[in-house]
Amino acid sequence: MATDYAEIAKDVSALKAPPNLADYADLRSSWNWDEIWAELDTPDGLVNQGHECIDRHATGARANKLAMIWQSQDLAVEEYTFADLKRETDRAANALRSVGIEKGDRVFFLSDRIPELYFAFFGALKLGALAAPLFSAFGPEPIAERVGRADGKAMVTTPKLLSKVDAIRDDLPSLETVIIMDGREEHELADRDISWSALIADASDDFEIEKTGSEDWSVMHFTSGTTGLPKGAAHVHNTVVSHYATGKYVMDFQEEDIYWCTADPGWVTGTSYGMFAPWSNGVTQVIDEGGFGARRWYETITRFKVTVWYTAPTAIRLLMRSGADTAREHDLSSLRYVMSVGEPLNPEGVVWGLDAFDLPIHDNWWQTETGAIMIANYPSMPIRPGSMGRPFPGIHAAIIDDEGNEMTEPMAEGQLAVRPGWPSMFRTYWNDQERYDSRFQMGWYLTGDKAKRDADGYFWFVGRDDDVINTAGHLVSPFEVESALIEHEAVAEAGVIGKPDDLAMEVVKAFVTLNEGREETRELMRDLNRHCRERLGPAVAPREIQVIEILPKTRSGKIMRRLLKARELGLPEGDTSTLEDD
Ligand code: PRX
């Protein structure tokens, strides 16, 4: 269906600075990860994400360049240069060391987006500890599950969130230390808690980074999967090589950019692209403590003259809901490049960017496990709306069949797989090596996603391996149906599942939420059904469409089709720890 939209090509010849990736084919054929490594600062082969992102800029020409522009919930602003970041993170590293944190220890973070979170996080990395961020909206159960799974030694949190930790800490024998970042809120300390401000007040800002090699642990993110308990995908310091490279060639970072990634560091996008990619490239980034709000977001872009913006399809759909006119009421002329990730970006969303910002939205694809972007649309390459783009130059991605053979025929559907060995590949699922090993088979890393590749090497997402609907022998992509549904002017969001059926095995069932001011009427439902049949044909169009108030989503914004399905079938809902409205 996406092919209805014309390819969008941008004339890059008139740009002030040519894109870093000027010629895809050329860069791909000459790609050499060793050359990327050589652009970093790795004395004696040692690499530390703290050094690459902060210290190497703090002592050079970028020392007084702004690294972080922080906007608080109530719109106060604080600014930190790379030299400031070095001082604060060195101090944080000493503070953590003073309470017994050592190389290899798992340090968890449960905090809103305040500067101290970033200082403490990089302090842990400089110390060689494994930094494991949690999403601040988690309740006690998911926190206990994750800390327990990785034998977390310390938790760094804030007064506001402490009660969630207190609720479970006695059940977690490994959790020796709870540190409260108490500088911004009044807080009365319990005897067993440690005050971050007191630690910092006593800490020197002179710190020698732990000698970490490329295979030393750095960051761990928990990822839910569609079933089962969360898995701790652990990464190593070498990951920064991919962060730097994708920052340079996908985000197209230029020295003067003001970059904004809207993701929270509780999720991998918020660390890989809200910390490591911009700062390893020496780029200034905006961090907003506040959450989504169309006006707040547009005002943030205007206020800080954001040039490069990385966000998520759900956010784009919410912005679409508030209308392109709302965008047009703001001066967004600083923006030069907009990207999104995390779930399929409907072709309509790509094209809506042209209406709202005069810029198409560039989709890219990756996973917690891949650590960095694997497939992307690039500024110098025409966009095919609905496609995730082409593999990053140093990455061999393929569509494979069940035997691990590459399916070279255009638009053949199979599993999306990647040849192992890229720098940011996860190195284990913590305490679950067996599950890790099961992801590597037949010489491939198996992503668990289904996709297609067209004749020109663009990849098209079909769905998670377990979400694809089989109706009367025809495979139907829920994404395709959802895209069609949200093209209807009354529909805000859509989630589509396969509903078991005696005759056809499964039929397509759609759940939709409506735009503000729209109501479920017989006319509307008739019109929606007609629209789908027209757009998709009778074999693919949903057999049933049901209007609901809210679609269940993961905290990172992905529609949880499995939950829709479980509810539809009256089955147990499984692990709902990442749900938005649990
Ligand atoms: O199914 C794919 C979907 O999100 C999964 C990865 O989710 P997570 O590990 O939480 O990583 C988030 C960091 C991106 C993928 O297996 N996904 C991600 N990007 C896209 C996508 N699906 C479609 N299009 C994308 N661009």
Image (cartoon, helix red, strand yellow):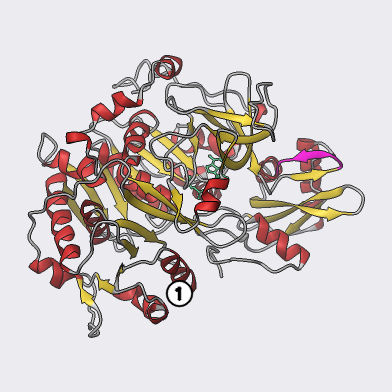
Decide whether residue 475 is among the magenta residues: yes
Q: Which structural element holds mark 1?
A: helix
Nearest the eye: 182 or 505? 505
Binning the other alpha carbons within 10 Å of mark 1 as few (below 14), some (14 to 19) or many (20 upward) gives some
- Amino acid type of the residue that numbered disc 1 sits on in the rendered structure: Pro
Decide whether residue 219 is among the magenta residues: no
- Residue at x-position 20% and y-position 64%: 96
Is residue 261 among what the camera can see? Answer: no
Quarter holding residue 516: bottom right
* Relative vertical location of residue 494 with respect to residue 149 in this rendering, above or below: above
Q: Is residue 352 left or right of residue 400?
A: left
- Residue at x-position 35% and y-position 17%: 14
Q: Is residue 553 left or right of residue 141?
A: right
Residue that numbered label 1 is attached to: 140
Q: Percent x, y for residue 372?
A: 42, 40
Q: Percent x, y for residue 44?
A: 18, 35
Nearest the eye: 223 or 148? 148
Q: How many numbered discs, if any?
A: 1
Is residue 566 among what the camera can see? Answer: yes
Within 8 Å of ligand 1, the CB of disc 1? no
- Residue at x-position 87% and y-position 42%: 472
Q: Percent x, y for residue 466?
A: 68, 49
> What is the quadrant of the C terminus in the image?
bottom right
Q: Is residue 298 left or right of residue 154?
A: right
* Magenta range: 472-477
> What is the quadrant of the N terminus in the image?
top right
Q: Percent x, y for residue 239?
A: 35, 41
